[in-house]
């Protein structure tokens, strides 16, 4: 039965409450971004993960625009870099990786080697533009001149920062961003109230939002683009039991060849929050 809103209000009755499921608003995808995603130079294994990671929709939701200056936090081997750097180069933007802090005397040799490999991989300016790496860590200085960055991307990182480092990290991002600059966060999603120090790789949206607010950010949007309702979040080796890591034994022990991955492979990659914050 349809209800006329004015008639209901005039009669002094309460309007019915409608349950609205989370949804992702359709947004046009920049064809230059789609071209970067479809670039055959990306590894086939990385492109296969697009079905779980939804790069076009995620980056568009986070507010990526042509010509932006973007900081990508701890890019690892460059899953996001392979998309972002060519796109930003083509649109006269700038890509900055927040990576290993070479000024930290305690930095491991592995971290130094990882940064060197990253810089070598993205040295071709004709393809990737002027990729730079800013030292980022527990004792690092500014990531960029204050107020010069449009967007900071924090992908699958906050679960590593529950020991208190998250406030230093978010403060670094806040300082680098322009007024009303954006911060996009994606991470494995725990139920609200879960202990962020549990070591499962999952953290709650509420915890991340609270930490961002304390650092001077305002929540500007949530998306369910990376949700996975099949993820039960109770796996024997935390989120790393799932693809792509597919851990089969406790940390420090060799892989267990008898471990049955089928149940976890059927889940796919984790259920993830996708949040957008504004610097205030």
Image (cartoon, grey):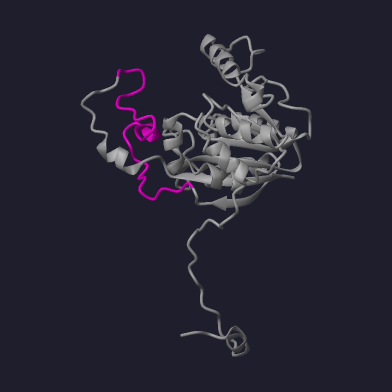
Question: In the rendered view of the protein, which quadrant contains the C terminus?
Answer: top right
- Is residue 116 visible to us here? yes
Identified at 54% across, 12% down, the residue is 113
Confirm whether the magenta stretch covers residue 247. Answer: yes
Identified at 49% across, 37% down, the residue is 196
What main secondary structure does the magenta stretch of the protein show? loop
Among the 4 quarters of the image, the one containing residue 132: top right
Asked if 14 appears above or below 150 in the picture, the reply is below
Among the 4 quarters of the image, the one containing residue 186: top right
Left/right placement of residue 181 relative to residue 268 reads right
Asked if 188 appears above or below 172 in the picture, the reply is below
Confirm whether the magenta stretch covers residue 184. Answer: no
Pick whichever, 249 or 165, lies toward us: 249
Provide residue 230's location: percent of width, then percent of height. Answer: 35, 48
Identified at 33% across, 37% down, the residue is 235
Provide residue 42's location: percent of width, then percent of height. Answer: 50, 30
Q: Which range of residues does the magenta coloring cover? A: 226-254
Left/right placement of residue 176 relative to residue 76 reads right
Provide residue 161's location: percent of width, then percent of height. Answer: 55, 30
Provide residue 146's location: percent of width, then percent of height. Answer: 79, 31
Pick whichever, 86 or 68, lies toward us: 86
Among the 4 quarters of the image, the one containing residue 86: top right
């Amino acid at each position: 039965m349809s209800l006329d809103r004015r008639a209901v209000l005039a009669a002094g009755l309460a309007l019915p409450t409608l349950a609205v499921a989370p949804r992702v608003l359709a947004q046009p995808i920049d064809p230059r971004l789609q071209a970067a995603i479809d670039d055959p130079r990306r590894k086939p294994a990385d492109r296969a993960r697009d079905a779980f990671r939804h790069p076009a929709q995620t980056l568009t939701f986070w507010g990526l625009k042509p010509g932006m200056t973007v900081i990508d936090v701890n890019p690892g081997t460059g899953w996001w870099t392979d998309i972002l750097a060519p796109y930003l180069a083509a649109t006269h933007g700038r890509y900055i990786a927040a990576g290993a802090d070479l000024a930290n005397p305690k930095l491991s040799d592995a971290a130094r080697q990882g940064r060197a490999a990253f810089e070598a991989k993205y040295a071709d300016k004709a393809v990737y533009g002027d990729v730079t790496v800013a030292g980022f860590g527990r004792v690092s200085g500014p990531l960029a001149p204050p107020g010069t960055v449009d967007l900071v991307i924090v992908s699958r990182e906050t679960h590593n920062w529950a020991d208190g480092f998250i406030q230093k990290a978010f403060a670094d991002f806040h300082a680098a961003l322009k007024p009303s600059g954006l911060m996009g966060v994606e991470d494995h999603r725990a139920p609200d109230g879960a202990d962020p120090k549990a070591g499962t790789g999952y953290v709650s949206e509420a915890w991340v939002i609270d930490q961002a607010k304390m650092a001077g950010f305002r929540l500007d949007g949530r998306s369910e683009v990376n949700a996975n309702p099949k993820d039960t979040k109770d796996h024997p080796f935390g989120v790393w039991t799932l693809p792509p890591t597919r851990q089969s034994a406790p940390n420090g022990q060799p892989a267990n060849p008898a471990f049955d991955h089928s149940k976890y492979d059927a889940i796919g990659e984790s259920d993830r929050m996708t949040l957008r914050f504004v610097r205030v």
